[in-house]
Amino acid sequence: MIKTILTPLNNSIIIQIPNNYIGKKIEILLYALDEVTDDNETSTKKTMADFWGTLSDETANELHKNVTEIRDSWDDRLNK
């Protein structure tokens, strides 16, 4: 993988592809770094209340049961 950051001086960039990339699908991304935000800084912490009405009661109960079982299994392992 090749990753680089540059500041263009005009509206053209010439990219030289390494020989071992020839014939392969490659992905080229172009974005300004000041447009990228860190999700951890800008988003608020989600709680279960944020998802109210998204899940059916049955699904929510199953998820809650799974979380409880996982928590209990960790408690059992830690308390041995």
Image: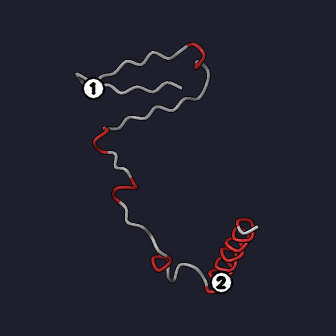
In this picture, residue 53 sits left or right of residue 4: right
Q: Decide: is 6 above or below 74.
A: above
In this picture, residue 15 sits left or right of residue 32: right
Q: Which mark is residue 45?
A: none
Q: Earlier in the sequence, mark 2 or mark 1?
A: 1
Q: Give, as a three-letter code, the residue at label 1.
A: Thr
Kindly identify the residue that appears in the image at 70 percent across and 65 percent down. Answer: 78
* Front-most of residues 10 and 4: 4
**Residue 66: x, y in percent?**
70, 75
In this picture, residue 10 sits left or right of residue 65: left
Q: Rate crowding at label 2 as few (under 14), some (14 to 19) or many (20 or more) other CA atoms within 10 Å.
A: few
Q: Quadrant of residue 11?
A: top left
Q: Secondary structure at mark 1?
A: loop
Q: Decide: is 22 above or below 33.
A: above
* Front-most of residues 74 and 34: 74
Q: CA distance from mark 2 to mark 1?
A: 52 Å
Task: Name the residue at the right extreme.
Answer: 80
Q: Decide: is 31 above or below 41.
A: above
**Residue 1: x, y in percent?**
54, 26
**Residue 20: x, y in percent?**
60, 16
Say which residue label 2 marks.
61
**Residue 33: x, y in percent?**
32, 38
Q: Secondary structure at mark 2?
A: helix
* Front-most of residues 77 and 2: 77
Q: Give, as a three-letter code, the residue at label 2.
A: Asn
Say which residue label 1 marks.
7
Kindly identify the residue that appears in the image at 37 percent across and 61 percent down. Answer: 43
Q: Decide: is 33 above or below 58.
A: above
